[in-house]
Image (cartoon, rainbow, N blue to C red):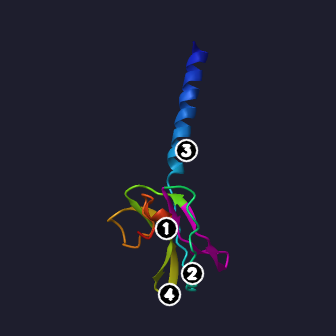
């Protein structure tokens, strides 16, 4: 009987640890490192045809890698109904530039910089 209770306790502990790990996996940490150089001008990429209905074009942006900017190409993502894509951007704070990651924002909320609507209209070009 003791062995059975120990096995049950071990199973509960492993399950609790796995649940705690899964919960922590959803938490993101962002450490802003200011860049002293402004990013280059955005490169316009004509979106190719979407892979399927409901996909939204996510425009490319300048990322920082090591000691210089690198262009991260645009891509398609499956849209989220009721949301728009707020693209990646660089905000200037004082004499430094900080990357702000793109994200889905509810329509009508956010900073007004949304691109792709999440309902798939406009053949995924995000310009409707």
Looking at the rendered structure, the secondary structure element under dot 2 is loop
The residue carrying mark 2 is 35
The residue carrying mark 1 is 125
First along the sequence among labels 1 and 3: 3
Query: Quadrant location of residue 109?
Result: bottom left
Is 52 above or below relative to 88? above
Residue 71: within the magenta?
yes
Q: Residues within 10 Å of mark 3 (few under 14, many from 20)?
A: few
Q: Position of residue 71 (x, y in %)?
A: 63, 75
Q: Which residues are magenta?
A: 54-76
Question: Quick one: quadrant of the N terminus?
Answer: top right
Looking at the rendered structure, the secondary structure element under dot 1 is loop
Spatial CA distance of label 1 from label 3 is 37 Å
Q: Position of residue 39 (x, y in %)?
A: 56, 83
Front one among 22 and 120: 120
First along the sequence among labels 1 and 2: 2
Instruction: Residue 95: give its label.
Output: 4
- Circle nearer the viewer, 1 or 2: 1
The residue carrying mark 3 is 21
First along the sequence among labels 4 and 2: 2
């Amino acid at each position: 009987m003791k062995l059975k209770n120990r096995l049950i306790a071990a199973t509960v502990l492993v399950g609790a640890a796995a649940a705690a790990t899964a919960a922590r996996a959803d938490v993101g940490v962002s450490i802003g490192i200011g860049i002293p150089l402004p990013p280059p001008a955005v490169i316009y990429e004509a979106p190719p045809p979407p892979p399927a209905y409901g996909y939204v074009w996510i425009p490319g942006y300048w990322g920082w890698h090591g000691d210089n900017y690198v262009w991260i190409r645009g891509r398609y993502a499956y849209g989220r109904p009721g949301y728009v894509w707020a693209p990646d951007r660089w905000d200037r704070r004082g004499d430094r530039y900080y990357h702000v990651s793109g994200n889905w924002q509810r329509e009508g909320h956010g900073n007004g910089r949304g691109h792709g609507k999440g309902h798939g209209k406009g053949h995924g070009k995000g310009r409707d």
